[in-house]
Image (spheres, rainbow, N blue to C red):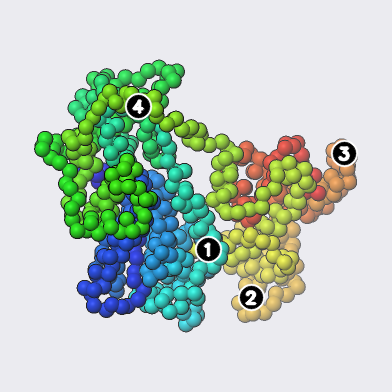
Amino acid sequence: MDGEKKMVVVENFVEYHLFLVSEEPSDPEQRKQILKQYIERILATFAPFLAPYIWQNQPFNLRYKSKKGNTPAHIGGITYFGDNIEDEWFIVYLIQEITKQFPELAARIEDNDGEFLLIEAADFLPKWLNPENSSNRVFFYHGKLCIIPLRQTDEKRNHSATNIDLTQALALLSAHSDKFLAADSVSKAVRRRLEGYPDKIKDSLHRAHCFVPAGLAAVLRERPHLISAAVQAFYLRDPIDLKACRVFHNFPSETRVLTSVTFTKCLYAQLMQQKFQPDRRSGYTLPAISHPQYKAHELGMKLAHGFEILCSKCPRPSSDSKRCPLQSPLWTGFLNTLKKNDYFKGEMEGSALYCELLKKAEIYFQQSVLRPESSVTESPGEQVLCLLNTLPINIEEMKRNEGNLPPDEDDSWLNISPEKLEQILQEAAGPMESVPASAISEQKYDLSEVTESMKAFISKVSSHEGAEVPWELPETPITFDLDSFKRALQKILGSSPEELDSDDLDEEEDFELLDSDEEEGIPPTSEALGSLRSYMDVMDQELAQTNIGQSFTTKTKRQSAEAGTSTTDQVNSEEDLSTEEQCFAPVDVDLNLVTNLLESYSSQAGLAGPASNILQSMGVHLPDNTDHNTPADTILH
């Protein structure tokens, strides 16, 4: 059991609950029997998908859960999926299909992050919905995503303080399910993650050739799902585990044969990305990297280490131990349900395909039906040792079959090009209008969109929950209220006279007057405003002579550049201007903003950075800089 707990290091789990929407029958025992029948029917209905599925850590399972507090009796389960996020979304697909096949059931599903379906659709959620009030509001019912809204009385109050009772939520679903369908944008965000199922299951598998001991090949042929436990044992190995691999007692290297092993892409990637050199005492040696079968030898060596680690954690079973036969009434009923659902695809009993499907059904039954109901579970290592004692191992026959193996599948999907990564990121961000790169580079980009988006962003009011990013430009132009700005600035400058230096003491009385006027609600006088302007003019004159002041582009310089004036003429014209005119030349805010953003964007060299993140969050996508010598003011116009 310690070894099994160790394999679930990353606590990534998904928890699912299925409720009877109807309150009938009210008798607890009858309701319990009905719910247990649903377990059998659900697992038998979805056996064609679940029986051959290879899970990363734990399988999908259902068990009866008695009433506890305000939670009614129901069926549910929990699956630790580790690093393979596809296991979680496959379970979401299963839950959705269960509520479609069994319309009298409503389902809730959440993971270690909480309501992850809402997280997936976070950009499209209504504003009232937040983590504090989302409990017991999100369901799958009749195969559709439903969100129970707030009551009208609650909408007028603080949203964060309103939750709903589970029994009340189920009653509302039963009576008014059509009114609680999630918005199309929310449903589409979830459906986008479920696209391709159930065919997507086959796409998540990878078949590869491996040189493995004959006993290991026999075990994988009998129980393909044990590949997950072995890969996890090797992936999470420690020095104590490797002590068991100095001498292989269960999988000696002398019996290696070439076989085809089916992985999930996640398991295959975990095994391939691990750099490992075996102990010389183990007997496992690798050929040269240039050898055509180097990868098969390396994969087989790593698998052998993983299985040996599993077996080292379990006591060796007695020689007369045999697999327990499945003769319980529960198995008989389960098998009959499989036959009714055409699980065996019309195959004659005793045929090769029938026996193969029956074997998968037995394993699936033990994992998903017997194990949740039993407090005693058999670890993967115990299963491997038991199979080694019972399975016939014919090395000569395995060697003869090496020429008939299916071809090794291409693993180029492990290497993602920058273009492919960009495509994946864009698909994750949601559908966007695709514009050819050539069209973007040829068109004259309007950078005024950058300045307008930035102004709209600054005008938004932020709170402790963050700032709202404007995805669309406002229809009405943004105006600058000079009087409001002056009053705010006056309050800041006049509220702390002790912060003024000695040169500003002559103006102290004016600022005190401004403070008293604003506090009394009296508009500032023209004399006070004139004093403020003179004070700001002095500040401008001082700043204009500094490096900071000279770094800004003024409208005078911009007009000279637009007129096509040469650099020499521009210098001469600036010399003709008085010092006062140069100091009071207004700064071109838009041009300076765009120039600084473009310089920051260009310095990112195509990588993520502050400029691209801010602009993309506002829906602005800049083209690549193909002309590094183009000045910003030229681009702007």
In the displayed structure, 303 sits above or below 578; it is above
Residue 582 position in % (x across, y down): 81, 50
Pointers 1 and 2 in contact (C-beta within 8 Å)? no
Q: Is residue 298 left or right of residue 552?
A: left
On residue 186, which mark appears?
1
Pointers 2 and 3 in contact (C-beta within 8 Å)? no
Q: Image point 49% across, 78% down: which residue?
A: 155
Q: Select label 1 or label 2 by which is in front.
A: 1
* Sooner in the amino-acid sequence: mark 4 or mark 1: 1
Q: Is residue 406 left or right of residue 244?
A: right
On residue 566, which mark appears?
3
Q: Image point 37% across, 31% down: which residue?
A: 260
In 3D space, how far apart are the residues under numbered discs 3 and 1 (Cα atoms)? 57 Å
In 3D space, how far apart are the residues under numbered discs 1 and 2 (Cα atoms)? 48 Å
* Sooner in the amino-acid sequence: mark 1 or mark 2: 1
Of residue 626 and residue 463, the one placed in the foreground of this image is 626
Classify mark 2: residues with Cα within 10 Å, few (<14), some (14-19) or many (20+). some
Q: Secondary structure at mark 1?
A: helix
Q: Image point 51% across, 58% down: which residue?
A: 191
* Sooner in the amino-acid sequence: mark 3 or mark 1: 1
In 3D space, how far apart are the residues under numbered discs 4 and 1 (Cα atoms)? 51 Å
**Residue 486 seen in this snapshot:** no
Residue 90 position in % (x across, y down): 41, 53
Identified by mark 3, the residue type is: Ser
According to the picture, the residue beneath numbered tag 4 turns out to be: 401
* Sooner in the amino-acid sequence: mark 4 or mark 2: 4
Q: Secondary structure at mark 4?
A: helix
